[in-house]
Image: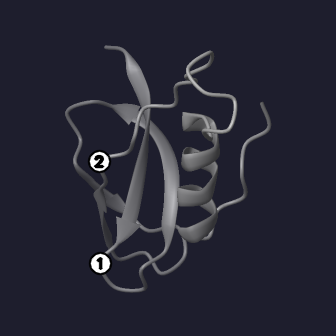
Amino acid sequence: MPRFLFDFRCTSCDHVFEEIIDNTIYNTDCPKCSREATRLISPVRTKLDGLDPGFPDAHDKWTRQHEKAGRAPVDR
């Protein structure tokens, strides 16, 4: 069965983390406090170029959302 990278948020300590699992799993244990964490719906990482040079691309939005969630941004 294929495995995918999903985001999870702990229902107890609010810790956000990523885990590679099969797509039928919706809950897992938090690595920080060992309580239940639920799968989040995450934006797809895409890049929209050529429309307007002043308009931030989707990667910038994705990076800001990950920083807000307390995770380090991913380099392009």
- In the displayed structure, does residue 7 sit left or right of residue 75? left
Q: Position of residue 38 (x, y in %)?
A: 27, 61
Q: Residues within 10 Å of mark 1 (few under 14, many from 20)?
A: some
Q: Position of residue 26 (x, y in %)?
A: 22, 48
Q: Nearer the viewer, mark 2 or mark 1?
A: 2
Q: Label 2 belongs to which residue?
A: 41
Q: Amino acid at mark 1?
A: Thr
Q: Residues within 10 Å of mark 2 (few under 14, many from 20)?
A: few
Image quadrant holding the C terminus, namely top right
Residue at position x 38%, y 66% in the image? 9
Is 23 placed above or below 12 here? Answer: above
Q: Amino acid at mark 2?
A: Ile
- In the displayed structure, does residue 42 sit left or right of residue 36? right
Q: How is the image coloured?
A: one colour
- Sequence-wise, which precedes: disc 2 or disc 1? 1
Q: Nearer the viewer, residue 48 or 24?
A: 48
Is 4 placed above or below 73 here? Answer: above
Q: Position of residue 62 (x, y in %)?
A: 55, 46
The label on residue 11 is 1
Secondary structure, mark 2, is loop
Residue at position x 61%, y 58% in the image? 64
Q: Position of residue 72 (x, y in %)?
A: 72, 58
Residue at position x 29%, y 47% in the image? 41
